[in-house]
Image (tube, rainbow, N blue to C red):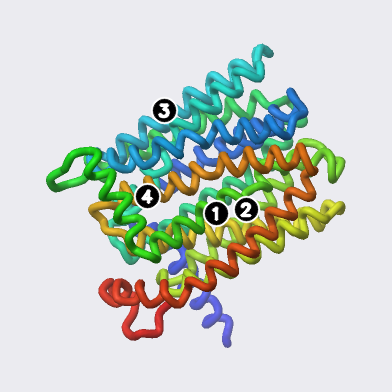
Amino acid sequence: MTFNELTTSGIERAGLVFRAFSSRNYRLYFIGLSVSVIGSWMQSTAMSWLVYRLTGSAMLLGVIAFLAQVPSLVLTPLAGVLLDRIEKRRVIMWTQVLAMAQAAVLATLVLTGVIATWHLVVLSLALGMVHAIDAPARQSFVVHLVGRKDLLGNAIALNSTMFNAARLVGPFVAGILVASVGEGICFLINAVSYVAAITSLGMMPAGLGKPTGPRKHFLHELHEGFAAAFSFMPLRTLIMHVAFISLVGMSYNVLAPIFAREVLHGDARTFGCLTAGVGCGALCAALFLASRRTAVGLSSVVAVATGLLGVSLVVFSQSRVFALSLGAMVVAGFGALATLASCNTLVQTIVDDRKRGRVMGIYMMFFLGVAPFGSLLMGWLAQTIGAPTTQMLSGLACIAGALAFSTRLPEMRRLKRPLYIEMGLLQSTNGR
């Protein structure tokens, strides 16, 4: 192959990866949220280190993570019904304003030196309530941004790229700032970063993401959402798999400060590097998914990626060498993102547009709402049997989950095939 052919191929591949950028609204969303998400990752990293510095408790790490996520268990399905009734753009603008206020209060308390454990508990719960509304709003808003269903999978993958590029940058910068000037500056930077997201949303046309058509009683629509999510076997399987991974597979987020300080004998920089390693692997997974032309074949990706996540967590649990631990976190980031983003794309591809907000609310309930129970479980286990043993059990559970999901693949392919043919994603019976 000649140099010109290689260059042309590379340009075409890049165009394939970033094809959702053809939408002005999506470009605005991507740019504004990129800045905001970097700030969010800085706050998340600083918060974990602050909790562990103030208390030295693995259990409290799990409690704080629990409080930040548990509102999703109750609020996300209710938010999903609302999102099928009101303008999604305006909802997201308000969630950004509320999150900015939370970060500003947290920064003030830390920088003035009056921060106490109960402040962290209350503010984590408040942010969890905001995220319970924001998460399904963002997920169901993507299709309105791109305007075309054939770009939906690419847009979701690019969202993951944005999220995990920020995960690569945010924790690394936060680790340096925490070690040099303390956690408060990270919270302040996060508060300022929300201005970019609010501005970008304000530049979009009014009414974007506003539902049309008659509405029914709130409880009736809530019931319709649950029926749509669980009556169709592929949707039900994907949602339950995401719930399982959220329960047992995301423990490295909770336990990373313990591994950084107690197992690898490092400091905030070590913790930041491990978290950034997860982000690096996740970024690679997001670019891999963005380069795919369609959702066909993603079910197999879910099975393989879940297995990779499990193996990497087992390796991480047994490692006492920083380089090996960092490598395991890169693979874990790849496996986790490839699993979750693929499930998200598959769900959004096959869901009925009229019920998208409700189904994504239920999806996020099982994704975000189950995660805090996993955080509590892993925090308790780490306190009881130690972080390395807990992490190893988590990895083995993910491997078992991958094998169980694999047994469902033939039936999922059979049931999805007519939908894919109707959408023009398949021209034959060879799709998966």
Name the residue carrying label 3. Answer: 97
Residues under labels 2 and 3: Cα distance?
A: 31 Å
Mark 2 → mark 4, Cα distance in angstroms: 21 Å
Q: Is residue 108 left or right of residue 56?
A: left
CA gap, disc 2 and disc 1 = 8 Å
The secondary structure type at the circle numbered 1 is helix
Return the x and y of residue 257 as percentages of the image width and height.
74, 39
Tag 2: Cα neighbours inside 10 Å, few (<14), some, or many (≥20)? many
Residue 28 visible in the displayed image = no
Q: CA–CA distance between discs 1 and 4?
A: 17 Å
Question: Image point 72% across, 37% down: which residue?
Answer: 175
Q: Amino acid at mark 3?
A: Val
Whichever of callouts 2 and 3 sits on the residue coming sooner in the sequence is 3
Mark pair 3, 1: CA separation: 32 Å
Marks 2/3 in contact by CB < 8 Å: the verdict is no
User: What secondary structure is found at the residue carrying circle 4?
Assistant: helix
Q: Nearer the viewer, mark 2 or mark 1?
A: 1
Q: Is residue 409 visible to the viewer in this orientation of the structure?
A: yes
Q: Name the quarter where the C terminus is drawn.
A: bottom left
Which amino acid, mark 1? Phe
Q: Quadrant of residue 91?
A: top left
Residue placed at 48% from the left, 70% from the top?
A: 299
- Residue highlighted by disc 1: 244
